[in-house]
Amino acid sequence: MSILSVKNVNKQFGGLKALNEVNLEIEAGTVHAIIGPNGAGKSTLLNCFVGRLDPDTGSVDFDGVSLLGMKPHEINQVGVSRVFQTPEIFGDLTLVENVMIPSFASRDGAFRLNGWGQVADENDVRENAMELLEDVGLVEQCDTVSNQLSRGDKRRLELAMCLVQKPKLLLLDEPTAGMARADTNNTIDLLKKIAKRGLTMVIIEHDMHVVFSLAEKISVLAQGTVIAEGLPNEIKGHPKVQEAYLGGAHL
Amino acid sequence: MINFNVKNKDHMLLIGFIIVVALAPIIMAPIGGGYPDLLQKFAIFGIFAIGFNILFGLTGYLSFGHAAFLGVGSYTAVWTFKLLTMNVIPALILSILFAGVFALLIGFIVLRRSGIYFSILTLAFAQMSYNLAYSVLTPITNGETGLQLRLHDARVLDGLFGVTRGEGLPSTSLFGMSMSGWSGYYFCGVIMIIAFYISIRIFRSPFGMMLRAVKSNQNRMSYTGLNTRPYTLAAFVISGMYAGLAGGLMAITDPLAGAERMQWTASGEVVLMTILGGTGTLLGPVIGAGVIKYFENIFSSFNDGILMEAFSWLPEFLQHAMVSVIGLFVGEGWHLTLGALFMVIVIFLPGGLIEGISRIGNVIRRWRKPKPLPTTEADTAASE
């Protein structure tokens, strides 16, 4: 069953056709990677999923609901969480607060004026947040201000913030960009662990090592069009893909 | 464990706060501030700054127009005195309500922008209100003269409850207790304690946490399923209501409302108070308000005569030299001292006077315990 269904999506920026008749079906419970050379339209496509951009024509349906015209917070409330290329966290707040905020957002909705209740009394939310921090291996630093974390740890924190909301779909925009090798491997292990629980994930990635260690299905985007789609093994040997990647020696 | 500590610390802070407010006349007496008029100003501007800090300290939205809400509060209070009753309770409730509605309208428009554009928009709105109060709104504001009580004001409620009209202008009261002198101060003091307690609750609530998230990363917030606009608007309205309350209290002290209360200098003053004391801290804004009002009232009253006396123990030429140098910084020149102090604090203590106090506290602690315990992140976070 497909959870995210993208049909005939077009997006034009001035004279540049960023997305050209893109069709994509994301199966529930799979890890789906979208790869492609720079400027292929990967990020534009992702932005169409989260309400940052609206396609010119075409449809994006999530779980039977059209995402077009919805604001980012509304899309999150229906069950789509997103991890950014540069980790977006609440840098001035402690780790546990960082995870408690999304937890409140899932519980209380997009806005709730709860100015009298005390955070200190919200034991369930706190314990839940601590569990997630444990899950990503950051529980010891729970009271650290999150700005002080390393890039890799920030990514782990951001994942915990997404996971605490129990999303139906997790979008990852180059989750290992700018990371040291060790951090990259740790992140891959963590994502594998998450994938095993049956969470649907869409990963946009440059690093083929990451893609082939995680993806169950791969779509290749080049110049705004899906040029190939299939299992990792099929993609590896695909002539069009090798051409798109200019020789594609690393494939 | 940490939660428990935060709660305990807050309780201690509140108890300490109540004690200081209660004993302020004695504490302030040695430095010449132990008289009700000044202490009342401390309390009123303390409330103003506490409210401002809920917006600026938590969400980071720097409003340059909060004096407009102060003005609305004052006008509302004086109108209540004129039309309904000299009792202060209805006046305060209506001041808060009107300022809240006014803040809702303005906030709805200005919160479309953030950063410097937000600041400019608030400034523009406040200046607009100020100019309107002087011109077209004269029937409501009484223009340049300011809104004043008259002998023949309606005072419907007072009439109903059979309050006898005296010969002169009536004075504000709390069910018969006159709101001047010490009773006036303690009334404002009690209100400030309540306002401070509410601010503690907000700081430690999930709502307060969301406001800090607004300051930290709005992008992440909306991708986390939170709608940032109502959060900022609620903070704006709450701080507007605090300003309205302060404006109402001003009218209680002196039942006269003038447009100059809405001028941008008044808006700027509360920004200075908050930054001077410590933005985003619970106690900082109150301390900032106290320091600025102290300078304004005490330093400005020092003249050359007083200085001559203070330096009379010096040889005459030195005495004259000292007086002419220090004279620049006191009396008329008190702004100079305040400006210098403000610069020193912003450069060396970005966390305001509160940061200074906690640094001194750390030095003392280290000095008492030869082997210092490394301060953990938890401590720093909790003390914020």
Image (cartoon, rainbow, N blue to C red):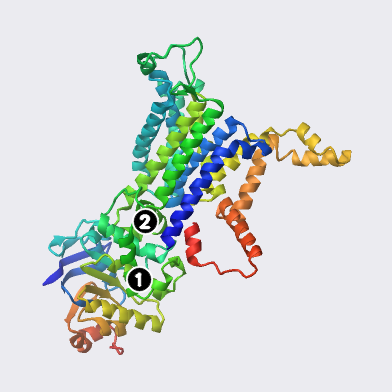
C-alpha gap between disc 2 and disc 1: 18 Å
User: Which residue is tagged 2?
Assistant: A119
Is disc 2 placed on a helix, strand or loop?
A: helix
In the image, what residue type sits under mark 1? Leu
A134 horizontally vs A68: left or right? right
Residue B223 visible? The answer is no
Q: Is label 2 in contact with label 1 (beta carbons under 8 Å)?
A: no
Q: Position of residue B336 (x, y in %)?
A: 66, 42
A20 horizontally vs B180: left or right? left
Examine the image and state in which quarter residue A85 appears.
bottom left
Q: Which quadrant: the C terminus of chain A? A: bottom left
The answer to which of B2 and B172 lies nearer the viewer is B2
Count of marks placed on residues: 2
Q: Tell which subunit mark 2 falls on.
A: A
Count residues near mark 1 (Cα–Cα under 10 Å), then give few for <14, some for 14-19, many for 20+.
Answer: many
User: Which residue is tagged 1?
Assistant: A133
Q: Is residue B71 above or below residue A187?
A: above
Q: Earlier in the sequence, mark 2 or mark 1?
A: 2
